[in-house]
Image (spheres, coloured by chain):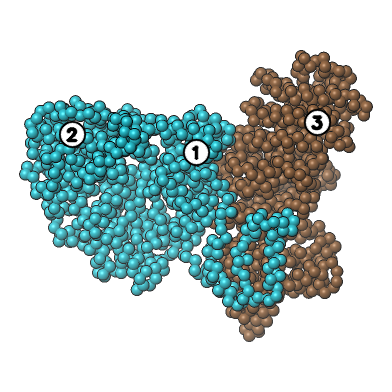
Amino acid sequence: MGDAELELSPSPPEAEPSPVQPSPPSPSHSPSPSPSPSISITSSPSLSLPSTPSSGPHHHGLRRSPSPSEGHGGSSPALDVISEGMGELTLVIDSEVANRACQEVLLKVKQQQQGVEEGSEVPDPHAPLIREEEDPSSAAKSARRRQRHNPSKQSWLLRLFESKLFDVSMAISYLHNSKEPGVQAYIGNRLFSFPHEDVDFYLPQLLNMYVHMDEDVGDAIKPYVVHRCRQSISFSLQCAWLLGAYSSDMHISTQRHSRGTKLRKLILSDELKPAGARARRDPPTLSLLSPSKRTHQRSKSDATVSVSLSSNLKRTSSNPRVESNQEEVRGPSTVRLTPQREFIKSLMGIGKRLATLPTKEQKTQRLISELSLLNHKLPARVWLPTAPFDHHVVRVPHSQAVVLNSKDKAPYLIYVEVLECENFETSSVPTRIPETRIRSTRSVENLPQCGMTAEQRTASFSTVPNYDNDDEAWSVDDMGELQVELPDVHTNSCDNISQFSVDSITSLESKEPVFIAAGDIRRRLSEQLAHTPTTFKRDPEDPSAVALKEPWLEKVRRIRENSPYGHLPHWRLLSVIVKCGDDLRQELLAYQVLQQLQCVWEMERVPLWIKPYKILVLSSDSGMIEPVVNAVSIHQVKKHSQLSLLDYFLQEHGCPTTEAFLSAQRSFVQSCAGYSLICYLLQVKDRHNGNILLDAEGHIIHIDFGFILSSSPKNLGFETSAFKLTSEFVDVMGGQDRDMFNYYKMLMLQGLIAARKHMDKVIAIVEIMQQGSHLPCFHGSGTIRGLKERFHMSLTEEQLQVLVEQMVEGSMRSITTKLYDGFQYFTNGIM
Amino acid sequence: MSQVEKKVGLLRRSSSSKKPLKEKVVLMYDEIFYRYWYMNHAVNGPLPLQVNLEYLESKLESVDGEEVQRIQDNINSLFHHCVQALGEEHQIKVVNALQTLCALFRGVHQKNKSSSGFDIINMLMGFDKAELRMKDLMESLDSLLCGDGSESLKSLCLKLLLCLVTVTDNISQNTILEYVMINSIFEAILQILSDVSSRGQHGYDAVVLLALLVNYRKYESVNPYIVKLSIVDDEPTLDGMGMVVHHALTEYSRQYKAKEEENQGGFFSTLTTMVGNMFIADADEKLSVQTNEAILLALYEAVHLNRNFITVLAQSHPEIDMGVTSISPSPTTPTTPLGTSPPSLDAMNNQEQLTLDPNLQTSNLLITFLKYASIVMQDTKEEHRLNSARLCLIILTCIAEDQYADSFLHDDNMNFRVNLHKMPMRHRKKGVDKNIPCRPLVCAVLDLMVEFIVTHMMKEFPMDLYMRCVQIIHKLICYQKKCRIRLHYTWRELWSALINLLKFLLSNETTLLAKHNIFHLALLVVNLFNMFITYGDTFLPTSNSYDELYYEVVRMHQVFDNLYCMVLRVSTNTGQWKEPASKVTHSLVNVRAIINHFNPKIESYAAVNHISQLSEEQVLEVVRTNYDTLTLKLQDGLDQFERYSEQPREAAFFKELVRSISLNVRRNVSLSTMSQDLLLKEFSTIS
């Protein structure tokens, strides 16, 4: 039973960055019996004052908690409030409960330290409440077990747990490494006290532990998960998807009865409703009687409407009468999760059907038509889980969707118009605006922007004294629109206005003829053509290139202009890549590592640039990816521009001395350094130009982390170099041994040093996911060891510098990179 | 006895070969006329017997004036009873009631062709009761159509309604329809269209019925169907309507193709058919498949009246296209007179057969419509087809005026291959259309217009169609100019087509002037050129295309010169064409400036370089270098156009069209086509 002792070892954040630092969770490592100086830094007064909350937010939570219950009339005792309270209150109260539970556990430990046997004697009025969170018997068992250990070690652990530095990362790591049910239960309770976003980041780890680790860990995690599921639809679905995905590696026979599957079923059955659900469900039924019938019908119908999404194109429930019938039968109970699930399901369905079509052209057309049907069911209470804000999806601009380049699967990119809202669960779903409504909303003022501004136009007609620009801008359509307001013009036929305007103009201008030079027209034409930003030519075999090349803001403007919802102030455009038939769990892992490293580098102020893009795992073979905006793959760049990378930089950003070029170059170097390190640390393989994007600012962005850590494509043993650094890249940096190139190496060194300092955070993310996983990246036994070794904890900074030099040299000389590019060119046509 | 009668009789005989005996029901009908039979049997609930429609109809017709007065009460009672029977549980009674009602409507109308609508109402229901009876009838029909009853029953209801709507030649004179206006069945029609299965079976009838109802006293009064149709915004319903139209048009194209292939059997077969045609003459309308104006009218009304329907045009239905193309020419409708017989819609159910054909295209209503139009517009000699072509162009006009439609026509992301049908012509090879690039839909529209312009310069000059055609192009270009859309289209084809059109007008001036105002058309054409010349910078795709425009104008300068001479001549004379001709003179100012500017330059270039014949590249070079010394006059109102309005200009056309559709529908709606045996079989099992 040496496990508990292991916890003792210094926790990374406090540790001084000593070159030879022991890595705490390693089982092979022997515990240091004397408390390391770093721990003593953590000054925690809580030991002497057991009632004091351990951390800041805690404090806050405790102090706040009584006030709502008082404000609530004060008549009901706290206990009642907890069980029957309103949705908003549960949050506060639950953290209070969690607090008490934490303290309880701590108290027990303390009592043990003092040699007091009866830890369970502590009077606890809330004991029944947290019963499901902690089995008293197991607590007693653990207490007994713990007793055997050195009490001083326990105290260090306790002090660590109570310290301000104890963050989610450490909690997760201890949860994984500790075999102590008491510690696990404690951490399980502590989860309640962390900010939601912080825990959400580690959700894959939590759930993977829940699925694959023993009973105690599961019991420690479950209350938190259940609690959060009650609060949030999006969290519920997230959990359900991840649980499904991580359970899939289990043997089919065990899978069915596993905890993960059960919890998933529980969530999807939608029994985990907020405590106040009953109360909240009443208003809708009331509103049945309310005069605002229209809105009610909408909000109520969206659920069933999207139900019909599943039978996707059959649209049996399309007619209103049938729909309302279904509504009543089903009732509002299963409605909570259904719309979103059906939305996702239909997106996946599209992907599957696209895969059956042979050509890109057909796929694109099919995609557009399927999406336009999907549009009929929107707006609904559905959202894109990759977005950082709450919203409702109102429309999919179907004609903008593109099929991405992939050999046999059919990933596709869609743009989604959403309306930002306070809370997608409670805010009402926007009402539908018919497609054709754009004509009334599309204002005349926008039109001149399409090409040249109104001023430009008038200015260009320099020889034209009397050219009335307004007349041109007032389209005939608007004339038609206007005529409604005008009282009896000539007769009541539609034509009159346009006729009328024609007359007015002619009569006005016939007095003095206006002359223009043919040369001006011709010049304007060529100027305007030259001024339009460089676009790629439309290629039916590569439909995504054009769509991705278009600047994001330009696209947003264009889509907004054409959208019936575009005039609404909360209108936003999102995009998402839907992948069907691909396992995104590795991508998710890579995203987490990238995100962690990005944080580390930011914290350590190393100007490395990487772009972690959000991943949504829906199952073990489907998911969504947040696209990187304003970026095209280097393959597409080279193919469409027919230029070398440096020349392309010159074309896009200007000559080498300009500010624009220099800043693009700097971006390039910073991102190259960042991704070089990532590629090295994670052993990212399959680095051909189709998997490296270049954004409008000059950054490169690596995508597709399908081959990381222990896996490599086809095991051909290609790509032996540490990372991809082609001579083209070096050219963009200005060439070898130039300033920018040295800057690149310097950045890498700094980045590696910083990453090394926080290695444990990265290791924890990866190590937990290895649990029970059959992912190829964990193939073999040395995955984690290899990863740790690549951080080179034992090297001095001088040695690290040499290492970086060697890696850069090696990568540049690497013939395999060239070979691999050649291989990709021949097999996949990627340049 | 009318033709309709004969036809019904004919069909009847073929369905049941036995000689019509004096059935019991016939005896009953006799009783209706000669005795107060009804009174005696009312209690027992009569009409459980099979209906003998032809007998009833002929009986009604055979009675003469005085007798009519005598039997009116009986007819009223029978009508009343039938309406009551519609609410019966026993479906067989409902079927009989529906059929009897239909026979009553027809018979009474046949008998009293000349009499006013009020007399007919009186005869059928009695004035005092009419309102109540019709209300009951419409309500019963509504509930039958919306209920979960038998599909054949619904079908019968629709047939009855179609029968009622088409009893008169001129729908607006059918006074009974006033009651159909008051007691709207619009919602029932919509419901049929919104539901997939009922749409498949009854969609066609429902759409035709709606199109006809919308045309009842369209211009004289407020027609609730017009109002209601114009505000429908339920997508599934509109979509369903689009789908019905889509299927009907697809079916037509398919049949046409089949016919075409059949006819390509070589010289001998064409010869024989020619000979055959000489003998058959107008017995069978040529080899062409009969056009379907009813469905086209429905499409027009939807596009014209309902803004939201525009979205349906671009809506594609992947699963259905798959089905349609995967089934081989179906054996379901081997009958040739297609008129209004519903096309087979089983294709909808065949979506399992997904073929992996790389040539397979996702289609939408607009594409289908364009293909249909390309067939119809090929041959406009015959009046039906001329009307169809006109209606097609009117629909296209409405589409071209709609901003939303324009936006998806020009959407760069929505590219399609549209295989338009082209007339086989001597100087043109057929079969090159396999490699049509994927382009925005507007290219297909322009292609269709160009194709029409090129192929219809004939003695019987379809002036009206040409006007519409050029106006559609103008509207599209106005949109492009307004929104700065640079369409990658080979404008050159359009320019040369337009110039050829001018040439044709010039060479046939005298014959054409006798019938048409050719100056109006010439003005439109010249103004199209003016659009390109003055606003080319806003919508031309490349700077080269502007040079090419000048090249084309200069190359064909003789046409413009001649046109100028001609209009100058006409405008200096006094006469009815003075003003329109002088308008053309003014509009030619820029074209003439270009010709007068560049021609000498080109000549001198040739002289300096000692070249007799300049190549295109050389001319373009001259054009490019000499822009700066050319001044153009800015003309006003080039981008203004007259918006389409049905009234008053098109009213006469639509009146005539609806009349011919009514006749056609009446001819084809036959209660007896639903074999009674079949109905009986079904209902005996149900009830």
Label drawn at residue A299? 1
Report the residue at 37% width, 44% height from top. Answer: A616
Q: Residue at x 57, y 63 (%)?
A: B484
Give the residue type that dot 1 points to: Ser
Query: Can you give x and y, in whole percent of width and height, for residue B488 in the image?
Result: 57, 62
| Chain letter, brown in picture | B
Q: Colour of chain A?
A: cyan
Looking at the image, is mark 2 or mark 1 earlier in the sequence?
2
* Labelled pair 2, 1 in contact (Cβ < 8 Å): no
How crowded pointer 2 is (Cα within 10 Å; few <14, some 14-19, many 20+) is rated as: many
Labels 2 and 1 in the same subunit: yes
Please provide percent x and percent y for residue A186. Answer: 20, 36
State which chain disc 1 sits on.
A
Residue at the image point whose x is 39% and y is 54% from the top: A628
**Number of residue marks:** 3
* Residue furthest to the bottom: B608
Visible residue check, residue A429: yes
Q: In this image, B592 relative to A206: left or right? A: right
Give me the disc on residue B545: none
The residue identified by callout 3 is B105
Indicate left or right for B469 with A281 as reference.
Answer: right
Chain of residue at mark 2 = A
Q: Nearer the viewer, residue A406 or B38?
A: B38
Q: Is residue A559 shown left or right of residue B154?
A: left
In the picture, the quarter occupied by the N terminus of chain A is top left
- Residue in the foreground of this view, choosing between B643 and B340: B643
Q: Which residue is mark 2?
A: A105
Give the secondary structure at mark 1: helix
Task: Quadrant for the C terminus of chain A, please.
Answer: bottom left
